[in-house]
Image (cartoon, rainbow, N blue to C red):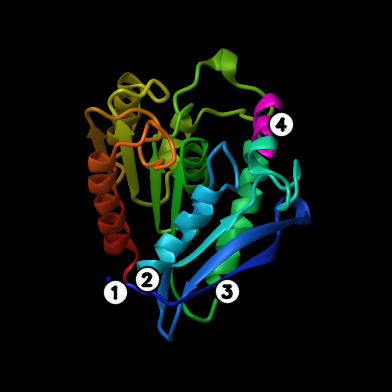
Amino acid sequence: MSFYRGMTCENVTLAGDKGTPITAYVAKPSGAGKFPGIVLVHHMPGWSELYIETTRRFAHHGYLAICANLYERTGSADTNPDDVAAKVRAEGGIPDAQMVGDTEAAVKWMRAQPGHNGKVGLFGSCSGGRHALIYASQRKDVDACADLWGGRVVMAKETLNAKTPVAPIDMTKDLSCPLLGIFGNEDRAPSPEEVNQHEAELKKHDKNYEFHRYDGAGHGFFYWHRPIYRPEQAMDAWGKVFAFFGKHLAM
């Protein structure tokens, strides 16, 4: 994969779930070419600096990249993302169905770009990993999905509600594309036992997947701005991410 030091970055407006306008951040490599696409599904801290930077990181690696603000109904793009995330968390998160509608808008935007090669991957961590998995199980318009330590894939029946009516693990039979899972063995959400349950279900339904688990790492070990960051494990796992997308999104 070539590296693209030049890129263009901007905000665009999408017609999200039920036609609601939402903002998305876009990074495009400079130059002509047919680039694969990455749709980033942000985590519970929201449409944050980390996800904006990660969108540019994918462009640097030769991908068209877009990250929609899934929390815009709670706070605009100008609102402090920490404040927005706190309010979303207090409200019990966003509805899974709304997330699917918003993410579908980002996928459609990607597929309409003239510089796109026709392949789309999903990338999400924490709640975004869970959301990416749900999307890839409910829609058939993506070619690969990366779930980084997505919690609440395995859910007890008493934790289901109107916003999260079906546990993602119960959607496994409908997973429509290859799946990459990145996990820390010191995580508790998902715990290693829950990852084992998820893997068993993927095997049961003969799905194309690869899981990578890291000792000495817990939840969010990519997050360079927090004490939970584990550089050695993160560097190795990033290599796995780019190898996975390189394999499944190249033409």
Amino acid at dot 4: Lys
The residue at which mark 1 appears reads as: 2
Whether residue 90 appears in magenta in the rendering, the answer is: yes
Q: What is the spatial separation of the Cα atoms under label 1 and label 2, in whole angstroms?
A: 6 Å
Q: Out of 54 and 164, give the one closest to the viewer.
A: 54
Point out which mark residue 87 bears. Answer: 4
Amino acid at dot 2: Gly
Residue 39 in sight in this render? no
Which part of the image, by quadrant, shows the N terminus?
bottom left
Point out which mark residue 62 bears. Answer: 2
Q: Earlier in the sequence, mark 2 or mark 3?
A: 2
Q: Earlier in the sequence, mark 4 or mark 2?
A: 2
Residues tagged 1 and 2 counted as in contact (Cβ below 8 A) = yes
Secondary structure state at the residue bearing disc 4:
helix
Amino acid at dot 3: Ala
Q: Earlier in the sequence, mark 1 or mark 4?
A: 1
Q: What is the spatial separation of the Cα atoms under label 1 and label 4, in whole angstroms?
A: 40 Å
